Amino acid sequence: MKKIHIALSVKDISTSVEDYSKRLGCQPCAIVPGEYALWRTESVNFSIRQTEEDAGTLRHLGWEDPAATRFSKETDVNGIEWEEFNANFQADEIQQIWPETHYSPS
């Protein structure tokens, strides 16, 4: 079953992790201090990334799909970027961007 993926830009990772953990009812499964956090619940794949300029805005949407055979991106008719990936592809992307982070989706 696909999960919706929502990626937001935030002003401050620490305060955002605290706030979104309360909203989602769980702690993130991956945190890169000062930069990134990821929550994977039964219904949503939710990530935040600290940015200076676009805090509080949508970065992109997508689908975590266990059947996805590759990581893909496309833009919809409204200019919103959509990604499709499986959990392992997302873990690989996190590892590539932040090699010091040891995140595994299982």
Image: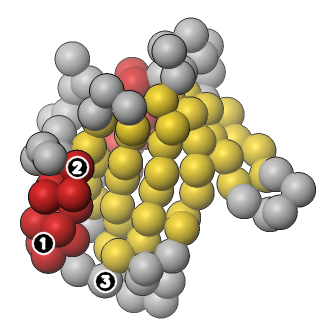
**Residue 50 marker:** none
Mark 1 highlights which residue?
A: 14
Q: Single out the residue that lies furthest toward the bottom.
A: 53
- Relative to 105, 22 lies left or right: left
Q: Amino acid at mark 2?
A: Leu
Relative to residue 101, is residue 66 depicted above or below? Answer: above
Mark 2 highlights which residue?
A: 24
* Crowd band around label 1 with a 10 angstrom C-alpha radius: few (<14), some (14–19), many (20+): some
Q: Amino acid at mark 1?
A: Ser
Relative to residue 37, is residue 72 depicted above or below? Answer: above
Q: Residue at x 31, y 27 (%)?
A: 42
Question: Residue 23, position in %: x, y?
Answer: 21, 57
Question: Residue 83, position in %: x, y?
Answer: 62, 41
**Residue 11 marker:** 3
Q: Nearest the camera: 20 or 105?
A: 20
* Total tally of numbered discs in the picture: 3
Q: Residue at x 88, y 56 (%)?
A: 77
Residue 71: name its quadrant: top right
Q: Amino acid at mark 3?
A: Lys
